[in-house]
Image: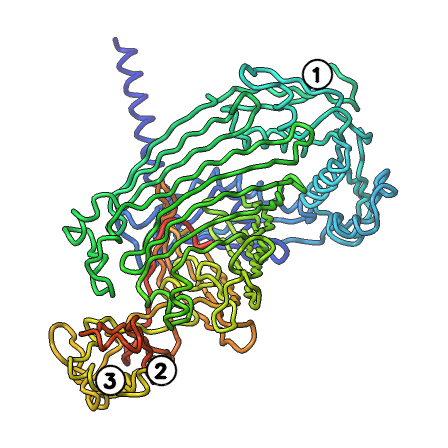
């Protein structure tokens, strides 16, 4: 009993002493390093366990914010600090400064915190005296040596860099078929001088080839298909890179839940026996998803996939998407928008009918050559933009894809499509640039589009959602003419790419570029021409501006545009119709009225003043007009963005976008729009908020309107009732001075996923 009491008192005393030591541990308020010239502060601090207290939100403002949960407090552990000094000496030793000394100096501040200064005395470096490549000297070309070997005689003996060089050379030799090669850098230091003899020892330098491929775990699929999907066969050069790529190809095929490719033991060193162990997915799958949108109302998507169609590894995909459901009942109610408000065809029921997208796609990889794949597809659609157009059509496509490298597929596709567009005349006038009735009749008839497209792409990003390293690019050349069966002749080329630079664990620099050009062909009996000029479909033109483009502009608002005045604002009286009917300028399709000045000039032709918010005004305002994009025949676009992950799921961004859209590359002014943004990493991807600044001034734009005839005599000269105003208008909705003018120039974008 007495012994137990003494033991309890002893344990209590030890706990008290331990608690006292914890309480006595001072808070580290500042940590700095001095005397270092050849190794930066970031690398040195990354090797230490001791860190300074910091703010959770803005790391550099802890001197101002010292309270509550906003501050991440760190205490000093003297034993750990001693170990940090050893870590720093080891780091300097590996980097070539073997005589470096580090000394901690601790000073106590008035607030009870401590400031730690690590004083470094680097001393003289140990240099590379000689560099012997051994067997690599004859195996590597002069260009390989310049590119792969970054260490020269007379430089510091950096063992970390030597290990990286050995790894790069091994990877290069692996791609040439030396699948077992290993390199070991050896440095022998002369004790009498600070120089070392460096030798790259090479082991297992022999060619490796695949002797056989064995597949395990298949029940439904032919093992030959699995081996073919892997992209390897007997006699092909073996490499570690090819082994990894074969496993990636199995996952990409979509046939397997799990796939492991390894080298079987027991073979000769230079002959590799591969074993692929797979776990099959069910060959058939069916999925139905749905959603609700304030603009598209209720939508459903159904998809059926048969990955082993007719038991020959053909992949059949059937997809049906239906939208605009319950639109007549929901339009304008609660959170759902009135998508027909202020449109030329307000109340037209065709825009509220269901939309539909049907697609059937069949693809098959060639057993004779794993790099080839063929595909055919059938499709049909009914799509609409409320108050603008309704487009129906369908067609078929055939494609051939070849993987010219493991990461670069090249696809040749032929597509035949029949479409019919029903829309107000303003749609064709805005999007095609033609407003006369003869041309409108041509464009509203059934159209045949039959292009041939050649495309290629690659994606070497480390993360498809939030990349920090790597690059991606795509390019497409599209051609349509009379001999391809198309009524629209054009040639279109587009290229796009992005590159990502890893600045640090928190900083990523992303660069993006896009360029394209399209030209129409005229003068043929089958190609659509209007007044001798070729017609380029609106969807084949180029547009810029928006959440994934030049973010200082709204969606597709950069480039050629035209202003539209709704009939509810610009509508003459019956007397105005009688007066305009006698005006010769009206018969040419142009109203003798200037919308850029006070409306009294138009009132000479008895036009009524516009009605804004239920009240007549004496002058048109920018808000009375709707800016419609026309698209351009050439586009150049570039962006640079710095992304900084500053806390938890939040990342800040600073960007500069530039773009130009016009009839050609030259002669079109390039605009620059800076901006800032923030991203929140959610389970569905980064939720992105960007704020772009638009510095552009007012533009002179053409103005068109659709006049409603009041009697039969009005429709005699022009039945369409579509007219262009005689004068252009200086237009810029972002007006104002001071802070108000600045805020009016800001464009807000909300979206999911990075801009590029």
Q: Residue at x 16, y 54 (%)?
A: 332
Residue occupying the far left of the picture: 614
- Observer-nearest residue: 55 or 552? 552
Q: Is residue 307 left or right of residue 401?
A: left
Q: Is residue 465 left or right of residue 503?
A: left
Q: Which residue is mark 2?
A: 588
Residue 473 percent location from the top left of the image: 57, 52
Residue 386 percent location from the top left of the image: 28, 56
Label ID, residue 580:
3
Q: With respect to residue 107, does 78 lie above or below?
A: above
Q: Is residue 139 left or right of residue 380?
A: right
Quarter occupied by the N terminus: top left
Local packing at callout 3 (Cα closer than 10 Å; few below 14, some 14-19, many 20+) is many
Secondary structure of residue under mark 2: loop
Q: Residue at x 37, y 78 (%)?
A: 701
Q: Quadrant of residue 710?
A: bottom left
Mark toward the start of the polypeptide (2 vs 1): 1
Mark toward the start of the polypeptide (2 vs 3): 3
Separation (CA) of disc 1 from disc 3: 92 Å
Q: With respect to residue 611, does 81 lie above or below?
A: above
Q: Which residue is mark 1?
A: 265
Secondary structure of residue under mark 1: loop
């Amino acid at each position: 009993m007495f012994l137990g009491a003494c033991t309890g008192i002893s344990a209590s005393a030890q706990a008290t002493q331990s608690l006292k030591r914890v309480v006595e541990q001072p808070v580290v308020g500042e940590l700095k390093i001095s005397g270092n010239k050849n190794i930066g502060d970031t690398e040195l601090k990354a090797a230490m366990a001791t860190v300074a207290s910091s703010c959770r939100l803005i790391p550099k403002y802890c001197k101002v914010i010292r309270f509550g949960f906003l501050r991440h407090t760190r205490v000093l552990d003297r034993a750990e600090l001693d170990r940090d000094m050893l870590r720093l000496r080891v780091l300097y030793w590996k980097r070539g400064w073997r005589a470096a000394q580090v000394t901690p100096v601790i000073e106590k501040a008035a607030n009870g915190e401590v400031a730690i200064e690590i004083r470094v005395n680097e001393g003289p470096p140990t240099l590379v005296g000689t560099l012997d490549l051994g067997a690599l000297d004859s195996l590597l070309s002069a260009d390989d040596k310049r590119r792969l070997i970054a260490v020269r005689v007379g430089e510091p003996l950096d063992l970390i860099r030597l290990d990286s060089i050995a790894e790069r050379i091994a990877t290069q030799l692996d791609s040439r078929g030396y699948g077992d090669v290993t390199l070991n850098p050896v440095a022998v230091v002369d004790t009498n001088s600070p120089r070392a003899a460096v030798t790259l020892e090479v082991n297992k330098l022999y060619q490796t080839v695949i002797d056989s491929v064995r597949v395990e775990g298949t029940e439904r699929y032919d093992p030959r298909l699995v081996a073919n999907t892997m992209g390897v066969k007997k006699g092909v050069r073996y490499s570690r890179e090819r082994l990894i790529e074969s496993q990636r190809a199995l996952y990409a095929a979509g046939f397997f839940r799990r796939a492991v490719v390894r080298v079987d033991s027991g073979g000769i060193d230079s002959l590799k026996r591969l074993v692929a162990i797979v776990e099959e997915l069910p060959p058939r799958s069916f999925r139905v998803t749905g959603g609700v949108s304030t603009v598209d109302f209720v939508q459903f998507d159904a998809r059926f996939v048969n990955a082993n169609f007719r038991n020959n590894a053909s992949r059949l995909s059937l997809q049906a998407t239906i939208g605009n459901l319950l639109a007549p009942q929901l339009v304008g109610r609660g959170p759902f928008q009135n998508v027909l408000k202020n449109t030329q065809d307000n109340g037209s029921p065709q825009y509220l009918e269901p939309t539909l997208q049907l697609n059937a796609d069949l693809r098959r990889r060639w057993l004779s050559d794993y790099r080839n794949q063929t595909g055919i597809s059938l499709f049909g659609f009914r799509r609409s933009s409320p108050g603008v157009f309704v487009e129906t059509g369908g067609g078929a496509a055939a494609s051939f894809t070849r993987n010219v490298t493991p990461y670069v597929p090249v696809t040749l596709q032929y597509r035949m499509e029949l479409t019919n567009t029903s829309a107000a005349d303003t749609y064709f006038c805005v999007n095609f640039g033609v407003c006369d009735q003869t041309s409108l009749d041509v464009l509203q008839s059934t159209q045949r589009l039959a292009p041939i497209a050649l495309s290629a792409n690659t994606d070497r990003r480390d993360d498809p959602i939030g990349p920090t390293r790597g690059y991606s690019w795509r390019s497409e050349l599209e051609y349509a003419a009379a001999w391809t069966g198309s009524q629209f002749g054009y040639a279109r080329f587009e290229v796009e790419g992005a590159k990502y630079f890893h600045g640090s664990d928190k900083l990523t620099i992303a660069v993006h570029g896009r360029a394209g050009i399209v030209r129409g062909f005229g003068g043929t009996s089958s190609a659509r021409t209007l007044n001798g000029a070729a017609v380029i479909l609106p969807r084949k033109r180029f547009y810029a501006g928006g959440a994934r483009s030049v973010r200082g502009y709204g969606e597709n608002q950069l480039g050629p545009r035209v202003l539209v005045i709704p009939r509810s604002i610009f509508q003459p009286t019956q007397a105005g119709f009688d007066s305009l009917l006698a005006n010769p300028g009206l018969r040419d399709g142009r109203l003798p009225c200037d919308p850029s000045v006070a409306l009294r000039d138009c009132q000479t032709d008895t036009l009524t003043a516009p009605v804004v918010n239920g009240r007549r005004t004496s002058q048109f305002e920018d808000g009375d007009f709707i800016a419609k994009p026309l698209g351009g025949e050439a586009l150049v676009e570039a962006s640079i963005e710095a992304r900084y992950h500053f806390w938890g799921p939040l990342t800040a961004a600073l960007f500069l976008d530039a773009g130009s859209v016009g009839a050609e590359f030259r002669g079109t002014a390039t605009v620059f729009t800076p901006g800032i943004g923030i991203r929140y990493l959610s389970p569905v991807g980064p939720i992105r908020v960007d704020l772009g600044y638009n510095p552009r001034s007012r533009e002179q734009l053409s103005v068109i309107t659709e006049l409603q005839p009041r009697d039969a005599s009005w429709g005699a000269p022009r039945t369409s009732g579509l007219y262009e105003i005689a004068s252009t208008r200086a237009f810029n909705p972002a007006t104002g001075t001071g802070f108000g003018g600045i805020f009016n120039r800001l464009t807000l974008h909300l979206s999911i996923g990075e801009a590029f």
